[in-house]
Amino acid sequence: MTEPETENEIISPDIGSPALDASRNPRPYFPAISPQPAAVPYTLDKERGLQINAAINRYLRDYQRDGVEFFYDKYKEGRGGILGDDMGLGKTIQVIAFLSAIMKKTGDGRDLNRRQEHVEELQDSQQWRRFRKLPPANATWPTALIIAPSSVVHNWERELETWGYFEVGIYAGSPKERQPILRDFELGRLDIVITSTNTALKDIDYLESKAWSCIFIDEVHRLKNSNSQSNLAFNRFNCLARFGLTGTAIQNNYTEFWTILDWSNPGQLGTLAQWKTWVTRSLTRGQDSKASPEQIATGRVIARRLVDRLLPHFFKRRTKDIIADQLPKKIDQIVFCPLTDIQKVVYKRFLATPEVQTLLKREEKCDKCKSGKYGRECHYKKDFENSWVFQFMTVLLKTSNHLALMLPAPIDTSEQTQRHREQANIAWPPINGVPQAPKYGEAVFDSQLCGKWQVLKDLLNVWRKEPGNNKVLIFTKSVKLLEMLELRLKEAFIDFRKLDGSVKQSERMNIVDQFNEDPNVFVFLISIMAGGVGLNLVSANKVIIFDPNWNPAHDLQAQDRAFRFGQRRDVSVYRLLSAGSLEELIYKRQVYKQQQMKIGYEASHQTRYFEGVQGDKTKQGELFGIKNIFKLDESGAATKATIEKSHLEQLDWALTNLEGAPSGKSDDVDLKGLTAFLLGKDDDPIVPKKEEEKDAIFNILNSNGVSYTHHNDALLKASAIEATMAKKAIESKKRREQDVKRARKLGKDGKNTSNAEWPPKRKHHRVHVDLERRLHERSDALKSLGYIEKKEDIRLAAEKMAHLTESQWKALLAQLDEELLKLKEKEKEQV
């Protein structure tokens, strides 16, 4: 996401050169917060005399120079690429530094009006007077087109003005206002043209063949659909130096990743069909919790090749880990809030509607005949509407959040009023023709209609009383829910500000400043689609995501409004989910998609939590398909059970298949520290918190019926067990392939020994291990050492062991095996 990023406060080390001439007014210039280093340029291409000027280079970090190198390496080859850095790492600055270098900017007043003066000289020439024709706009210096969301077009303009002297045109407004910008560009008067995504799409006929040296698309993931209008239009650009910026290149699936990579380098990654076969299919099947060793091996090999061999040519990504020492801590806690009794009743009523039942029966064997066909192929083939799926998903999400969302409200249109009356009559069936639904104004304040409200209310009360001037961001994707929260905050006399799509762009920054600067403003209510990106809200240290998004990127970007450069306090994020409802499925899909990001970007060995395989209708598991959408798990513990099951399976596999460290080889592991961790004597392994804060939050959640929470980041950690499992699967696959090759070489009858190796290699006979017996014995050792005291302890132990490193596992297993020997010695003595 591109936004104001002049928070590059940590200046590079002194690199030893004369300081800049202040009399030339170098840009950028920020008041030094530490001794200013001597400023020198950074050479990109000595032969061509290309360098990042000293004015910019003095403020760059090493990884940002590396990003500029990435752009230039592709540019000089006439190719493009995608910069996929996390939000807040300065993608904007890296682009500006690159453009400054290829345009040979000095970084001071000498760049002012450079093109304007050059064009005037050309127009004084004989060629102009004779032919009235000028060279292409990029004949003397390169040019650039920047396409960005409308909300950040002026951010780009402001940053370019801050970081140098660029001649910039904003291609916006009416056709009459846009025309002079293109005219100036064609005459060669502009370095850079900035326009919005929508305007570029609308005017692609005018823009596609202009003399652009390079094109940048901010938020390039918006091109993720290969058949979308914007993707088809932006593939028409003649310029092949196409660059994209995004912090979320993989959002929903691997196919979207191919789409934006292919836009930047048309035809260089093969066809979409090839990508789906070799990448998408391999990675998704390898992540299935029921994957075979062959599928695990293939998935891991392809992931490694993708990350090591393919992506470096097209894609560069750095995460906030690179600046972790410069940021405070963040927790991202998932809170499974119970539905109230009336919410459960209403939820079931909607599931029982004829429309939802028809949708479910279409996915089952037909109950009206004995044909053995599915309902969608038989008696339920015609009597349904495609719109029902989205219609009733929307209703279930309303039910999960606040039942007042399905009541007619004063702000509703006539169409919405009619729809809400129909929904209200299902939620509260009329008795003898008399409506039973409550009035909207009363329902908004009825806590029994919203299981999340009391949790939110209690959290706000605790944070208001704490010292330190806490500030809270509350995000929701529902504008109507935002208004309901506004009414509740007014009732509680809480000072707040609100931002939704109705707020004009010109008013946004004023509202943001009020929240950031006024210590009395406690809460900022934000529509996630209107304010999830482009805002700097580092005054906040608490974030509430009231309802989850199908796309995890939206929730992550919302968190980053507070957790970013400039934040000086630890940030606590609480994502509220209605347990057992459709929201819990949405969250599980989020985890699945975030794991895809980890695998696609890093070839990370992720825990295989889910049976569902994206895009495979035969393997919908617990994630995909109508049956998973339209159901209510009243236990509210489905996600917890899924995670525990995966951890227990990993523990069983490790106890059964892994060898302990050889005697004397585990000295580098602190066994006392490991024991303390496994026995629960350590602090929170994810983010230490003050005990009183932990107790207060725990009491709030517990008193409101929340029986389960977890930290999202814990689910996304690389697993040493999965890595070892994959390693063994790959080795096994290689052995099988070698056996096949040898068999082919010997011939069908197996008697061809003319090329047999002599003398034959000695076979090393391994001692046979009774795996089942080993599992039971090591389990006994866990009990003997006190890691497990009672049956239910095994789940907690499995959860903690899921985060052990490979060396810790080996040390633990060696400890267990040593304990086994002691137990056996005791048995002998007793005999």
Image (cartoon, rainbow, N blue to C red):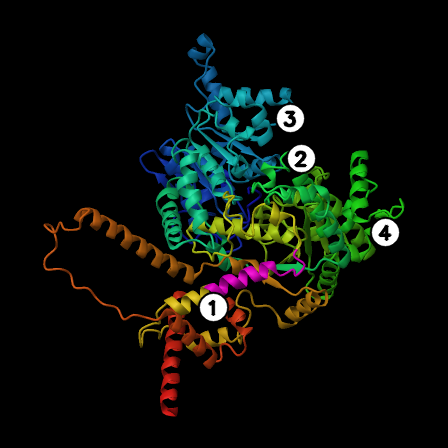
The quadrant in which residue 418 appears is top right
220 to 305, vertically: above or below: above
Q: Residue furthest bottom?
A: 830
* Residue at disc 2, secondary structure: loop
Depth order, front residue of 497/110: 497
Q: Nearer the viewer, mark 4 or mark 3?
A: 4
* Residue at disc 3, secondary structure: loop
The quadrant in which residue 700 appears is bottom right
x and y percent of residue 757 in the render?
12, 55
Q: Nearer the viewer, mark 1 or mark 2?
A: 2
CA–CA distance in space, label 1 to label 4: 49 Å
CA–CA distance in space, label 3 to label 1: 59 Å
The residues colored magenta run 633-649
Considering only order in the chain, which callout, 2 or 1, is on the residue closer to the N terminus?
A: 2
Considering only order in the chain, which callout, 4 or 2, is on the residue closer to the N terminus?
A: 2
User: Amino acid under label 1?
Assistant: Met
